[in-house]
Image (cartoon, rainbow, N blue to C red):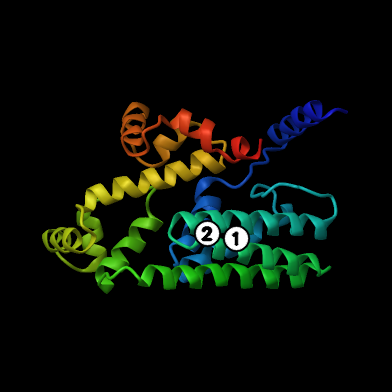
Amino acid sequence: MDIKREINHKLYMQREENIKHLDYEREFGFYKSISSGNMEEVVRRYQRYLDSNGNQTEDQRNGTLSKNPIQNRKYHFAILGALAARFCVEDGLEREVAYSMTDVYIQRMDEVSDIETIESLQWQMIKDFTERMQETRKKDIYSKQITKCIDYIYNNLHKKLRSTEIAEYLQMTPAYLSKLFSKEVGMPLSAYIKDQRLVAAAQMLRFSDFSIAEIADYFEFSSQSHFTSSFQEKYKLTPKKYRDKYSHKALDN
């Protein structure tokens, strides 16, 4: 069976068996929690990642990259490290630091031959990236309230975010939150939320196969045209042209 036929056969079997890879909330939300330095969220999401790793459940799957269970875990380890590094670089970690970390951890992983040790090393890598992002973000001089606000936004970009709800979560009035946020961050709260949604959307365009319409809908844009115009204003490219230029597939060619 040639590669194209094998791919088509695999897609057919996935449809027949209702097998799906991790969606954004389960996969990209996990990487975003690492790059935001949110250890509590990382712990929560990592357990869900492990529940899906290696095709151990029926409907939550990362994909089979090798029929050998140990080799399969090693491949996923390498992918996780590479994506964690890219997300952290985009959120402020020095490029050489991020990729050197990935290289070292993958080299260490390559020396072990049991799943328990691989998982232990994988958690060490995730924790290392998260802690380094915590230190990176401390360089931003924000109050505890605004730092907590930013964390809340990171974790809820795919939901409707209203200033009244965020203010209630932070136990302050919307007016005070708006004033404090603008003062410390340098832009209105609504503008920051929109900007971070566009940043996350750009990551999806680069690293996933979700359609532009699905991405626009996921991040609560009123329409695909609204998303396209907002994206083009920030990145000077339409979502399609951005994906064509910067997707992992384009960069690998």
Residue 153, x across and y down, in percent: 34, 56
At x 40%, y 35%, the residue is: 216
What numbered label is drawn on residue 99? 1
241 in relation to 205, above or below: above
What numbered label is drawn on residue 95? 2
Q: What residue type is labelled 1?
A: Tyr
In this rendering, position of residue 11 left or right of residue 99: right
At x 68%, y 32%, the residue is: 15
77 in relation to 124, above or below: above
In this rendering, position of residue 51 left or right of residue 221: right
Q: In which quarter of the image is the C terminus?
A: top right
At x 50%, y 50%, the residue is: 25
Q: Residue furthest right?
A: 1
Residue 89, x across and y down, in percent: 49, 57
Q: Which amino acid does label 2 sit on?
A: Arg
What numbered label is drawn on residue 29? none
Residue 50, x across and y down, in percent: 65, 61
Residue 22, x across and y down, in percent: 60, 47
9 in relation to 188, above or below: above
Whether residue 161 appears in this view of the structure is no
**How would you rate the neighbour count of disc 1 (Cα within 10 Å): few for under 14, some for 14-19, many for 20 or more?**
some
Marks 2/1 in contact by CB < 8 Å: the verdict is yes
Residue 92 occupies which quadrant of the picture? bottom left
Q: How many numbered dots are placed on residues in this image? A: 2
Q: In which quarter of the image is the N terminus?
A: top right
Spatial separation of the CA atoms under disc 2 and disc 1: 6 Å
Q: What element carries label 2?
A: helix
- Residue in front for this viewpoint, 159 or 105: 105
Whether residue 22 appears in this view of the structure is yes
